Image (cartoon, rainbow, N blue to C red):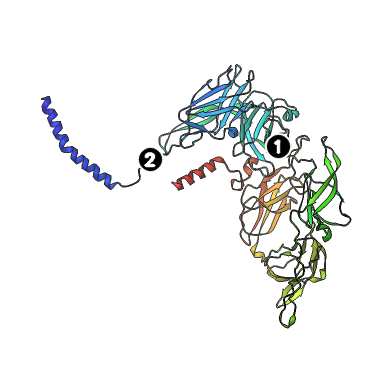
Amino acid sequence: MLQFENQKIKYIVRRVLPVLTLVAVIYSCASIGQPRGGDKDTTPPRFVGSTPVAGATNAKKNKISLVFDEFIKIEKATEKVVVSPPQIQQPEIKAAGKRIQVNLLDSLKENTTYTIDFSDAIVDNNEGNPLGNFAFTFSTGAQIDTMEVAGTLLDASNLEPIKGMLVGLHSNLNDSAFTKLPFDRVARTDSRGHFSIRGIAPGKYRIYGLMDADQNFTFNQKSEMIAFNDSLVIPTMEERVRMDTAWVDSLTYDTIIEKKYTHYLPDNLILRAFKEINNSQYLVKSERLVPQKFTLYFANKADTLPVLKGLNFDDKEAFVIEKTLRNDTIHYWVKDSVLYKQDTLALSLTYLYTDTLNQLVPRTDTLRLVSKQKLVKEEPEKKKKKKKKDDEEEVEPTKFLSVKVDAPSSMDVYGSISLIFEEPIAYFDSTAIHLRQKVDTLWKDVPFEFEHDSINIKKFNLFYDWEPTIEYEFTVDSTAFHGIYGLFTDKIKQGFKVRSEDEYASITFNITGADPLAFVELLDAQDKVVRRRRVVNGIADFYFLNPGKYSARLINDRNGNGEWDTGNFEKGLQPEEVYYYNMILEPKANWDLNNQSWDIHAVPLDKQKLDELKKQKPDEDKRKNNNSDERRRR
């Protein structure tokens, strides 16, 4: 019986197998296409164990081994991984296979909680999925300190989040601790400026931010960006309840479960980072790029100009001096052609210099200035000149003094005309400058203001109250301006028409919470300043704006100097406060956006600046863009 059944099965197989083979061949021929892989791995690595175990107490070994459920790697370990308490000797952190080895080179402190914060540095080996917000903790004592404080660190001048800056705590409440002692606990800011300091013992602390240039965890260089909080930080915790939802499917939930958890405070600290003004004064460099001019660069502003004395020339009335408002960059134009044709100008320079005791003292340097550009020698006059018809000599073309005329053909209602020369002007004839207005078909001379620019000695400005939609003509007679090297200007003629008021928009802010001396900067979509206005009676208004996108920031100008001022740690002086209007305004032509209410304290400081204005973009956004680019390439 068994033999009969076996023969029957073999008979069925022999009959059916060719049919199945034929069907498979036909299907494979009909299904032409690229082979498809499995779904993309989006799951981050999972921590599965360690030596010592996570949360271990009375740990004595400097070497830690962490194990994960898949092959992993570490991205930018020196930037992202932070060990707290901070380590003077950089720890050795290596990834191999599914394991991470950490070797702490500093001696372990007794009765101390250690936290190794990996942030998002751990990623899987294939797709780079990050294990975000991962930290490993152990203690050399009998207990684990579990307190945490968190917040955001921003650039004080423009509320940009700062990535990669240290934020640390000191239990020593003296200000000198920041400049002499390493932090007790430390964290590093992420791409959003967020920080979270873990493993803190109960107590009172001072908190600081530090862009640690020399990696010694102390503020000992003026060039380092810093932040400090005026108030003490006292870590606390409270029990909170969150709702966890169990879902049947993507649309239907099953149950909502209340879960208790411990929340640590404070969690919303705001630190405003700044660089102190470096008041050290010294000569940075001197240069003579062209024969007729040399320049001195100083490290800081000065109230007076340096004293210059010629060693191989007579310095009396030898120069036209062009300087900045701060007197930190000074150009000396040599007036006499015989003098600037010298290969070397030797001079002594006396100026105020900051000594080792941080005191300003007179100092004299000897400078020998050689031009980097060789003077072109004049060609000797040819014995035989080319002749034209009737034996007339060929006349060389006149070389005029170069000038840039800033007078756009479509003039703004609030605009002005500028003349910018390549060299200082020796003198000019004001009667040779004309402005005419078109009335019907005739041109009429109109009075105007013409003055030397207060900052740039090579620039002159013409001001007039333009009438909208009216045509004007600006002319300058030839030889009106004479430069210090003998050249004069050619005739200038420029026509233009003033724009209509209907082409403009306006914005008015009604502001509450600002200091009496505050001012508002109107910003474009790239966070660049377009206009600046004082806040008067709670109002800042901006007229004759081109249609477009605008935002604004307000500066509490405590000293009334019209600019943002930085802070000073030694004096306990915070930088002047900056606030952003939390909206983008987009006025159209002939629109008036009046009464824009702006309470500068209504929105938390770290939420005020819109993401589209920020230059520091979150890493997750960059990762999304990279994934999109990768998909497009595929």
Q: Position of residue 402 (x, y in %)?
A: 74, 65
What residue appears at the point 24 percent right and 42 percent down from the top-left corner?
Answer: 24
Amino acid identity at mark 2: Gly
Q: Mark 1: few, some, or many residues within 10 Å (few <14, many ≥20)?
A: some
Residue 174 falls in image quadrant: top right
> In the depicted view, which residue is nearer to us: 331 or 412?
331
Residue 397 falls in image quadrant: bottom right
> In the depicted view, which residue is nearer to us: 32 or 47?
32
Q: Which residue lies most toward the bottom here?
A: 390
> In the depicted view, which residue is nearer to us: 75 or 136?
75
Q: Where is residue 31 in the image (x, y as percent from the top left)?
A: 29, 46
Asked if one can make out residue 69 in the rendered structure from this viewpoint, the answer is: yes
Q: Quadrant of the N terminus?
A: top left
Q: Where is residue 617 in the image (x, y as percent from the top left)?
A: 58, 43
Q: Are marks 2 and 1 in contact (CB under 8 Å)?
A: no
What residue appears at the point 18 percent right and 40 percent down from the top-left corner?
Answer: 18
Task: Return the disc, 2 or 1, that comes first in the chain's sequence.
Answer: 2
Label 2 and label 1: CA atoms lie apart by: 50 Å
| Residue wearing tag 2 | 37
| Residue wearing tag 1 | 224
Q: Where is residue 275 in the image (x, y as percent from the top left)?
A: 72, 40
Q: Is residue 54 above or below residue 31?
A: above
The secondary structure type at the circle numbered 1 is loop
Asked if one can make out residue 306 in the rendered structure from this viewpoint, the answer is: no
Q: Mark 2: few, some, or many residues within 10 Å (few <14, many ≥20)?
A: few
Q: Is residue 200 above or below residue 462?
A: above
Amino acid identity at mark 1: Glu
What residue appears at the point 73 percent right and 83 percent down from the top-left corner?
Answer: 390
The secondary structure type at the circle numbered 2 is loop
